[in-house]
Amino acid sequence: MLDAAEKKRLVKKARQLRERIVEVTFTCGGAHIGGAFSQHDILVALYYKYLRLDPAQPAWSERDRFVLSKGHGGIGHAVILADKGYYADKLLDEFNKTGSPFGMHLDRLKVPGVDASTGSLGHGIGIAVGMALGARVTGKSYRTYCLIGDGECHEGSVWESAMAAAHFKLANLTCFVDRNGFSLDGPTEKIMALEPLDKKFEAFGWRVLQIDGHDFDAICGAIEEAQRERERPVMVIAKTIKGKGVDFMESKTGWHYGGLDDEMKRKALESIRRTYPD
Amino acid sequence: MAKAQGLTWTVEDADQMTQAEIYGAVITQMGQKDKRLVALTADLARSTKIGKFEEKIPERFFNFGIAEANMFAVASGMADAGLIPIVSTFAVFSSLRAAEFVRTDICYQKRNVKIIATHSGTSFGQAGTTHHCTEDLAVMRALAGMTVIAPADALETAKAVEAAVAMDGPVYIRIGRGFEPPLHKDLGFEFQIGKAIQLREGTDLTVIATGVPVRHAVEAADLAKQQGHSVRVLDMHTLKPLDEAAVLAAVKDTRRIVTVEDHSVVGGLGTAVAEAIARSGKGCAFRSLGYQDCYSIVGYPDDLQHHYCIDGDGILAAIGEVLKADFEADEDWADED
């Protein structure tokens, strides 16, 4: 269970990093900001409480793996990796610039701490299945975590990977669905219906947990539940809000991707501080 | 040949084995010695012969069912764990169905994965065009960081597999279905990735071939010799990196080149050699044999090789035509004053 002090620490970290996402989005001219905010609290819980990592050794063979299968959330991942000390935060000023190591979708060979170069949807979960299988073959104890988008579940390869993870009984693999309800063109249920998503993953052989993806008690509870599972991979369907924390972005299709001017940046930061007061 | 012995394997009656059988045997022996090797397939363990690995090392063998995209993504993740995945399925599924996974998860991320693609070209001719693969060399050549090898027979396949595992980085090895007669009689040939093997010396014309048609090129060169023509034969087993020095030497020494491949003339060996010739800036009569931008018809492999002029007869005819080409006297090349 999450004690009050730890929860406060995670909430504060999540707020500070949301502010940083706004600043980097302002500087770089545009980012997939809506999805970065919906996935954000899950990443904060993983990186600041659970993942066994050593930022001084990004390729440490025993490290826990994290694959951001919805690679367009790269801006959110990048600010966390900077904060964890993988590289200087100042480097984020170069986000999206010509020749920069940071594009919208992060490259594992250019950005320390990134375990897989993602961006093309439906790839990362398969890579995560390989990492989890690799741990079994090599006798390593690391765990593999993966986060997929809900729209990403339209990709057939997600279901190939889901079948394989259950077939090989990869209990060392925990995956999250960032169920914000939107893909680029609009609501997922209008574009191509996914529900009942929980029953689909259950039918594929996963243990499914459903949580509020912005509630740290629920996120941490699900991660610990998954760590106790011995038979099956665990899929945590996290109900989230696209643009969470910035009132004018929340659940707006238009904020899948966007840039910020001075006024929008000021309003976004104000909204985040209102949502997450000290 | 009773026994063939590589650095890491020994096979009885290797000259009687098909490409597929020998790679299955070699990979299995290598896997018994090197615990980093894992074998992956997509419901084609028996057809590709990687099932041999499963018989001996079941704990490092993984069958993903009929789902190639996921299999190549998984291979990327297993390589992250320090393993060397050997992924085997038909060429058409490796290079076309799963192309983006090979590109994005393996090549772009510099993952140490070896792909052994079987049933390439029209080697499974009677299966029909959905199972032919005349585009894989073009696709794989276009992937930055990919090493592309098309061995001519079983013994060359054995050496290619050994060399691929010994190097770091993605490798694509394309072989046939595996009923082709051997080219090499024994292992007394040097195989080095990126270095062509000269099988016949010649000064009038050079045939550069890759994969199964290499032995047809030798046959054609020997027939041409009886007609008084001196034809060089290069076994260009590595498409990428291409042995440009061997191509340039052929341009310089023979000024006439014919390429032969069990593949489309778009993007494969013929294209690679043509690029090298063009870069050289030297004049050279040139003809590329292969599938001429078409979907191959159904039939037995030998019949199809004849139909598409990549057998001994077809190559010999092309040699005759290219020897007649008098490009240096062509009036179109005269300077306009």
Image (tube, grey):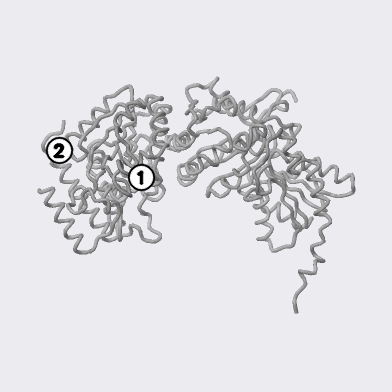
**Chain of the residue under label 1:** A
Question: How far, Cα to Cα, is label 1 from label 2?
Answer: 26 Å
Residue furthest to the bottom in view is: B337
User: In the rendered image, which residue does mark 1 sit on?
Assistant: A114
Q: Residue A28: horizontal and vertical position, in percent?
A: 30, 60
Asked whether the viewer can see residue B239, the reply is: yes
Q: Amino acid at mark 2?
A: Glu
Q: Residue A152: horizontal and vertical position, in percent?
A: 35, 41
Q: Residue A62: horizontal and vertical position, in percent?
A: 35, 34
Above or below, B263 relative to A219: below
Q: Amino acid at mark 1?
A: Val
**Which numbered disc, 1 or 2, marks the residue that appears first in the sequence?**
2
Residue furthest to the front in view is: A190
Determine whether, in the image, residue A262 is placed left or right of residue B76.
Answer: left
Q: Is the same chain shared between marks 1 and 2?
A: yes
Asked whether the viewer can see residue A57, the reply is: no
Q: Quarter-wise, where is residue B28 in the image? A: top right
Q: Quarter-wise, where is residue A194 in the image? A: top left
Determine whether, in the image, residue A10 is placed left or right of residue B318.
Answer: left
Above or below, B219 relative to B320: above
User: In the rendered image, which residue does mark 2 sit on?
Assistant: A6
